[in-house]
Amino acid sequence: MAEIIAGVGTSHIPAVGAAIDKGRTQDPYWAPYFAKVEPVRQWMAEVKPDVCIVVYNDHANAFSLEIIPTFALGLAAEFPVADEGYGPRPVPTVFGHPDLAWHLAESLILDEFDLTLVNEMTVDHGLTVPLSVMFGEPDEWPCPIIPLCVNVVQYPPPTGNRCWRLGQAIRRAVESYPGAERVIIVGTGGMSHQLHGERAGLINTEFDGAFLDDLVSDPEKVAAISHVEYLREAGSEGIELVMWLVMRGALSRDVEQVYRATHVPTSNTHNGLLVLSEGAAR
Amino acid sequence: MSAHAKPPRETGREYDDIPGTFVFDGRRSRQGYALNKFCMSLNTPANRELLRADEAAYLDRFALTPEQREAVVKRDWLKMLELGGNIYYTYKLAAFDGMTFQQLASQQTGVTEEAYVQMMLGGGRPIEGNRSRSTSQPSAARNQQGAARG
């Protein structure tokens, strides 16, 4: 059977992508953050997953207000990089894993998670920035990527609890796949930030710290956080944190925290990094 | 499109008391549909060229209310949000104008870019005093409070 060997949490801030693309990672503003990224890249290079499932949100690129899928799974063999209004990021095309993706689709829908299935879509910074964070600047991404889009732009997003349970179903689905793939699941977005309105710039490191503590050791407590609490405490755009629960739900109860770091500010956001491993036994 | 632009029925929501925040719920999505559709169109390079060549003619293609159109023409970013714009959509227009996200944020919060950048370097806008309207201070004071941490 295939197996989930680890989970990664990371913000997906577009400015991080721009800093990489423009060669500014050693600028005084950026160097402290990219120093914190380095252990994640080293760990990734050692672990060498066969596939990554990346849980992220589209930001008015592949989807718009015309059609708003709550959960959309990318089945394609490749996903072009989106033009978000100012040209696509100069990063490699993202190649998918149609066989595992279709297995996930069938397994999850029969497990009562009614996904939208997508055969053609572009991927925006929500997916490509996490790839840059984890893999740096390779000529090709080192493994196939299965995109799982979660709507967090149109209120209401799915509840944290729904995301947590979807993660559990993804684990069941992966473990019923007749292959030997070692899969890493990546939850992206957040942490606290607000981009719009007069409250823009809100950061709540206390909320984020408790979120990370509990995500590791008491994830049901995190799954119970209400939307209003996210909006109020983590900023209106901080509600993206529900996507980290998909990642956590796909892991065992007891996980090893391999790495954790946060950095403030990155543009308007409290930037989070978390690596959770199933451990040496797996 | 007029059915979308019609002001939605107002019903109070628990999150309406969060200060300086426009939660993009169904009320705002309906109100801002054409405005966001205009912004979305800027993902296509040919449309960006059309907007640059003749803004008025390009805006005619979308069923904006007069108020929404005025907010777009004046680049009144906060007004666009009040009228149903979503930040991920309105940012496309800001990027079209060559603005960074922090420049957009500073204009929405009514401070200079430098003051906004300093606020973020100082740890961002604090949550204390910004949880609900009933406990919050006026926005200018809040901005100063945030900037003071830098």
Image (tube, coloured by chain):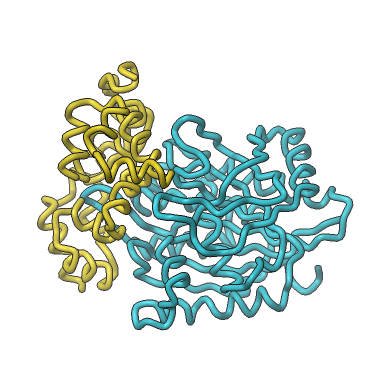
**Picture residue at 55% right of the left edge, 60% below the top:** A128
Image x and y of residue A204, in percent = 34, 61
Q: How many labels does the image show?
A: 0
Is residue B103 or residue A11 the one in the foreground? Answer: B103
Image x and y of residue A125, in percent = 49, 56
* Residue A105, picture quadrant: top right
| Residue A85 against residue A112 in the figure, above or below | below
The residue furthest top is B3
Left or right for B28, reference A109? left
On the rendered image, what quadrant is the C terminus of chain A found in?
bottom right
Is residue A30 or residue A186 the one in the foreground? Answer: A30
| Residue A77 against residue B36 in the figure, above or below | below
| Residue A251 against residue B135 in the figure, above or below | below
**Picture residue at 65% right of the left edge, 77% below the top:** A43
Q: In this view of the protein, can residue B82 be seen by the observer?
A: yes
On the rendered image, what quadrant is the N terminus of chain A found in?
bottom right
Left or right for B81, reference A38? left
Tint applied to chain A in the drawing = cyan
Image x and y of residue A246, in percent = 61, 50
Q: In this view of the protein, can residue A252 be seen by the observer?
A: no
* Residue B118, picture quadrant: bottom left
Chain the render paints yellow? B
Image x and y of residue B117, in percent = 23, 68
| Residue A254 against residue A65 in the figure, above or below | below
**Picture residue at 84% right of the left edge, 49% below the top:** A177
Is residue B36 or residue B138 the one in the foreground? Answer: B36
Is residue B147 or residue A195 the one in the foreground? Answer: A195
**Picture residue at 57% right of the left edge, 57% below the top:** A187
